[in-house]
Amino acid sequence: MDLAYLFGILKRRKWLIVSAMALAAVMTFLFISSKPELYKSNVIIATGIVNYKGINSDNSDAFVQQYQVENAFLNLIEFAQSRSTLKFLTIELLRHDFDAEAGKTGDKPFRTGNKALSNYSEEEKQQVYEEIRQINLDSLSDFNFSPQLDFSLDKIARAYGYDNDALLRGMSVKRKTSTDYLDISFSTESPSLSQFMANAYGQRLLAYYYNLSVREKRKNVESFQKLSAEKKAVVDSINDVRFEYLRQKGLPALGRQSEELVSQISRLELDRQRAQAKKNAAAESVDRIKKYERDNESRNARENKNRLLERNNTVEQMEKVRELKRQSMEAGGKDPEIEAALAEANADLEESLRTSVRSQGRTEDTELKKTKEDLYKERVSVDLDRIDAEESYSRLNNEIYALKNKLSSMVVNDEVSSRMLEALNRAMYEFEKVDNELIKAKLTLENVENPLSIVQGALLPEWPEPNRKVLLSIFSSIVVGTLFVIVLFILAYLDSSLQSPDLFRKYTNNLPLIGTLPIIDVQGFRPEQIFANTDDAFSSFRESLRKIRGQILRSKAKVFLVSGAKKKEGKTLFCLSMAYSLAHNNKKVLVLDTNFKSPLPESYVDRPSVGSDEVNKLVKKHKLEEVFHLKLKADNTNDLDIVDVLGNTGLSQSPSELLDNESFKALLEDFKQQYDIILMEAAAINEYSDAQELEPYAEKVIAVFNANSTIGNVDQDALDHLRDLKDKFAGAVLTEVNPQKIM
């Protein structure tokens, strides 16, 4: 299959391809035009991933760090698009619309429920509304909804277009080039809805991410608080039992030494109170410094945002000045409009630079503002003071308890009191140990910071997003056209039929071809119609016959055997049509039907012809009446056919079994005296031996092939047999050829 043939296929199918491409373009254009306009709003979040990793190309493990950063961003993006995270936004949106529908806010609902998407009852909606109003989204770290609420929530969210799939379709989460920022955008049909979704989602993402990061730490604090309370209850219970026991016994009876111990205990208790006061003051200072840190972070975020906007404005002004300078140089400085615009752009650039310098000067005034590092150092110092006060408090407690135990041992020698005192000491030790762990867990929880922060909030979009319908229409047209071409090429590649002379020579290994016959309508077709008029329906078929006729006449042979590899290849049509073509060239033609397996129909055989009397005489002479039909005699000479057709009686034997060799040769010799051309038709070579048995009686052999058939392995023997005929093989005729396929 060559390129010319493939391009021929495209040429024949060009209008089909063009029509398909045009239809695809129109349908795409109309489909996109029918879609509502989308408005996009985005929020930018600092992740802290790059800052924490400290990427440095000089490090030997830079590649590993880069991989870790990229993996961390991928994990964060997946977390941001997870179903649990988006459920926060679903609840937030449903709350807004439900409140707006109930008239509790001055806003209008962004959307109304479409019950065609998800059928729900008003009672079910009200129940969901009441339950989601009670959910505190700021402190939620895990969804413990009941299955019924979860099912109803998803069903109603689907009706409002706030379900997980709908939100994901309009959501985009990506990293901003190689920065530490994450760009989260939402595209909806309403500008205010897009802005609300972006801002609400940013807040919910920060809270949810922080709650997940401290969830285990909170559980540790709660666990230690519970255990500390249990240990304290044990200490108090033992102390109460012991006090009641001593009271009932009338103990203790204090002496001078015990009075000194009591005085010492009193002093230590005063020191413990001072340590407690110092601890409380340090804790309050820590809280106050944390407030300063949060205020400082908010102020720095605003200043960073302003600097970012001023920097972007300066870059845009510089780009504008550069472009106007280029235009001015191209115009030679003679265009007043460009020169005026250039002067104005230079003034704007200078003003933007002055603003940027002033902003930088303000941010670098370190004497007026404490940096985050200074605040952190101060908080660490105060924290250390608090820890020192707590250790002093704990040490004083231990000393007080030791002195009290000593006092008790001095005044109480009772065995029961001693056992109670031992139990009290053990319980106090366990309580202090758990209390210390509780303090550490609280410090760990308090020092956890959220790595995520909002750098730029979502703004109200002014213009809808470009739908690129022209570009997409062109693209869809190209895709459809390409697919059509590929399909046509695949079909052509898979099609192994003969189709054209080139393919015939390819599949038959250059078997000689004397001509082709185009496809014609054979319904009610009669060969005499071909030359009876000049109807354009047969003009191509008629001219093809004339070309083959010329080659037959140049061969100087009289007896031709027409055969083929398969059944129904067009042998009979060729024989009869060629006979009439030769007859119109003033040749006497006899069609001898030697295809005993498929005889000619009576409509061809039982027709009187010019040589009927002579044919009947010769058949009787050689005693072949039982093999061939005798011709009918005509009542009117005007009804005589110009071609003599001698049919057979349709016997099952082969020619060698039916025909006596000498008699049939003598019959053919007599026919050659009466006719210029004798055409014998034989059965298919693949299925019967008739053609091979008739070949000795013929001077030339013509093989008929159909353009719609294929050459299989079983056909190779027939092709080899035809080649073995050498000069006796006149050539092949290819029938039912589509003229468009040989253009």
Image: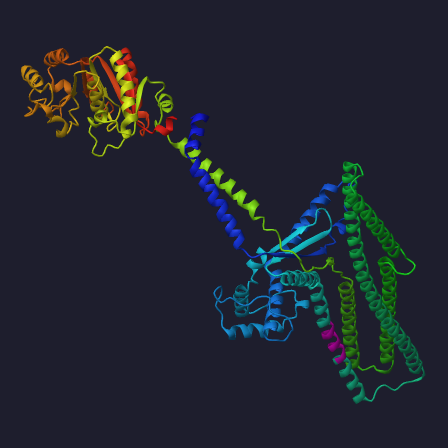
Instruction: Residue at 28%, 14% (x, y): give it.
Output: 724
Image height check: is 48 above or below 115? Answer: above
* Quadrant housing residue 527: top left
Q: Is 699 left or right of 333, judged from the image as shown?
A: left
| Residue 14 on image: x %, y % | 44, 35
Quadrant location, the N terminus? top left
Q: Is residue 247 above or below residue 312?
A: below
Left of 632 or right of it: where is 568?
Answer: right
Quadrant position of residue 105: bottom right
Q: Residue 236 in the image: x percent, y percent?
A: 76, 79
- Residue 186 versus residue 620 in the image, above or below: below
Q: Nearer the viewer, residue 515 or 261?
A: 515
Main SS of the magenta part reads helix
Give whichever of 153, 702 is nearer the camera: 702
Can I make out residue 650 in this image? no
Residue 532 at x, y percent in the picture? 21, 26
User: Is residue 230 inside the magenta stretch?
Assistant: yes
> In the picture, residue 270 is in which quadrant?
bottom right
Q: Is residue 215 left or right of residue 254?
A: left
476, above or below 263, in the image: above
Magenta stretch in the rendered image: 228-236
Tell me, yes or no, whether the highlighted magenta stretch contains residue 233.
yes
At horizontal 85% and vertical 85% (from top left) the residue drawn is 252
From the viewer's perspective, tell me whether residue 274 is left or right of residue 642.
Answer: right
Residue 171 visible in the snapshot: yes
